[in-house]
Amino acid sequence: MTFRGAPPRPAASRLRRNDRRLGYLLIAPEILVLLAVTAFPLAYNAWNSVRHVDLTDPATTGFVGAANYRALLSSDEFRATLGRTVAYTVVSVAVQLAIGMVVALVLHRRFRGRALVRAAVLIPWAVPTVVCAMLWKTMFDPRTGFVNYLLGLAHLPGSDTTWMAGPWTAWFAIFVADAWKTVPFVALILLAGLQVIPEDIYEAARMDGADAWQQFWRLTVPLLKPALLVALVFRTLSALLVFDVVFIMTGGGPGDTTETLAYLNWQAFLVDSNFGAGGAVSIVLVAMSLAIAGAYTRLLRTDREATP
């Protein structure tokens, strides 16, 4: 059935094709720039990963196939570094997501000075990571920092700790510095998700006798799933590729107990000048990142399809 004045179907289909073609043309420059910035280095790393490219021994450069990957996967150092990186990623993402949720819920409430508090909370996120890491390294210094002083003033354990001298204390310092900077980012994403949830739903739940915990678990969390998954994607990838905080605060020490995969990659490239091994580490990191992002994207798509 066709209404008078409505365009025929072929015209509508042609219009949609023209709109789609225009969209492709508009984003083509950005795609070309992204390809130039990311595709070429990625392809070059993939090519290096199947070759022996050691700048300290350029005479032996040549194709070695999967030898770099076999050496990497059979390395005890790589397996230990992988375990540390995965453990740090799981713990940091879980804790920071929980803290970010609490901060977002607080900022979502109405109170006097809310705009000022929201702006203040975002300040750590605006601080460059290098500055953040140097700041916390100074604060954890037992001679010049005030962390030990405050712990001693409150008669709490740890007032005489040399934080960067032990693996667990060094990881704790890294975790605190990273959380201080990234929790506001998580809170900002979750706050945006909270603001699109209609208040009428909570009023109806209160009228049905639901308490605060039931409202949070049965309404807020399900309706906030898209924002939670977006925050999970960004934070998981950021934690998996953490480098600058580790490099500045501990330099991978004490020993190699705080080295991450990104730190191992930097060491292979710029310290050992072994571009073959560095390329293999890079490709492994890219594969892990794509797998995680793909899993989260699939989960988000499935969640959206299940939502009526």
Image (cartoon, helix red, strand yellow):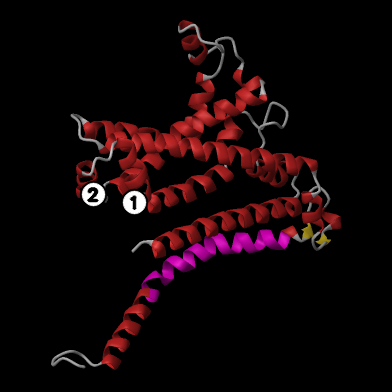
User: Magenta stretch?
Assistant: 24-48
The answer to which quarter of the image holds residue 220 is top left
At numbered mark 1, what does the secondary structure look like: helix, strand or loop?
A: helix
Q: Quadrant of the C terminus?
A: bottom left
Magenta stretch, main secondary structure, is helix
Name above or below for residue 141 compared with residue 191. above
Residue that appears at 37% across and 80% down: 21
Decide if residue 103 is on the left or right side of residue 249: left
Q: In the rendered image, is residue 128 in sight?
A: no
Decide if residue 222 is on the left or right side of residue 53: left
- Which residue reaches farthest right? 60
Mark 1 closeness class: few <14, some 14–19, many ≥20 residues within 10 Å? some
Residue 252 percent location from the top left of the image: 66, 32
Residue that appears at 19% across and 49% down: 200
Q: Quadrant of the N terminus?
A: bottom left
Q: Label 2, on which residue?
A: 201
Mark 2 closeness class: few <14, some 14–19, many ≥20 residues within 10 Å? few
Marks 1 and 2, how far apart at CA: 11 Å
Q: Label 1, on which residue?
A: 223
User: The disc labelled 2 sits on which kind of residue?
Assistant: Ile
The question of residue 35 being in magenta is answered with yes
Decide if residue 174 is on the left or right side of residue 128: right
At numbered mark 2, what does the secondary structure look like: helix, strand or loop?
A: helix
The question of residue 102 being in magenta is answered with no
Is 266 or 170 nearer to us in this picture? 170
Circle nearer the viewer, 1 or 2: 2
Task: State if disc 2 and disc 1 touch (CB < 8 Å).
Answer: yes
Is 105 or 238 nearer to us in this picture? 105
Residue 258 percent location from the top left of the image: 66, 32
Is 91 or 121 nearer to us in this picture? 91
Residue 260 percent location from the top left of the image: 65, 39
